[in-house]
Image (cartoon, rainbow, N blue to C red):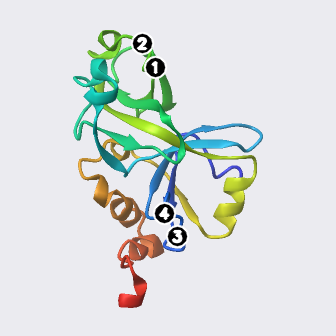
Amino acid sequence: MPDVIRVGGLLVATPLLEDPNFRRSVVLIVEHDGSGSTLGVVLNRPTEIEVTQVLPTWGGVVTGPSVVFQGGPVQLDSALGLASVRGDREEPLGWRRLLGPPFRLGAVDLDAPPEVLAAEIVSMRVFAGYSGWSAGQLDSEIREGAWYVVDALPEDAFSGDPSRLWRDVLRRQGGELAFVANCPDDPTLN
């Protein structure tokens, strides 16, 4: 199971996952170390807080919706930026690759001056907090049926309609997972 979890991959909550922090969530894995500790951000939980309210200098760089997303239940007072950058240039300062060629998705140093990166950024989102798992915890949750592990597309991190991301990611998998995308919010009403 540890080989399945990788930086740049997606965790998609199965209908069995009832934890309100992760119900029907899509999590992009941004760190996974040799000991099995994993860190990710929930891609489909926009808040109503405008980026300009918390990071005014980045407000003009963020692409819509220009709100802060709740990246997970851990350290909600911290922020993480994700951005795709132009593919025809060197990697810009203040940006660390998560998904490699041909995709250019990475983490942004929010302490850097936005003008250093602004011309290179194609799309960007800001996340408050993150999702974290200690060594072995995520492996266990996957074995218990809480998560599907699938490949990410660069546009997943910047979905124009985050409320549809869970269904959209499952549908494109085909087979059984495409069928799961149609699972009603409350199966007892089916």
Q: Which residue is mark 3?
A: 18
Foreground mark, 3 or 1? 3
**Going from the N terminus, do you reach mark 2 or mark 3 first?**
3
| Residue contact at pointers 3 and 1, CB within 8 angstroms | no
Identify the secondary structure beneath mark 2.
Answer: loop
Q: Earlier in the sequence, mark 3 or mark 1?
A: 3
Q: State which quadrant residue 178 falls in.
A: bottom left
Dot 2 or dot 4, earlier in sequence: 4
Q: Quadrant of the C terminus?
A: bottom left
Relative to the observer, which residue lies in front, 76 or 86? 76
Q: Is residue 41 above or below residue 22?
A: above
Query: What residue is drawn where x is 34% and y is 57%?
Result: 165
Q: CA distance from mark 1 to mark 2?
A: 6 Å
* Label 3 CA crowd tier, 10 Å (few <14, some 14–19, many 20+): few
Residue 115 as seen in the image, left or right of residue 37: left
- Mark positioned earlier in the residue sequence (4 or 1): 4
Does 7 sit left or right of 69 as displayed?
Answer: right
Separation of residues labelled 2 and 4 (CA atoms): 34 Å
Which SS class for mark 3?
loop
Image mark for residue 112: 2
Q: Which residue is mark 4?
A: 20
Mark 2 residue type: Ala
Q: Amino acid at mark 1?
A: Asp
Which mark, residue 51?
none
Q: Disc 4 vs disc 3: Cβ atoms closer than 8 Å? A: yes
**Quadrant of the image occupied by residue 30:** top right
Q: Residue at x 64, y 62 (%)?
A: 142
Is residue 111 placed above or below 103 in the rendered structure?
Answer: above
Q: Between marks 3 and 1, how big is the CA–CA gap?
A: 33 Å
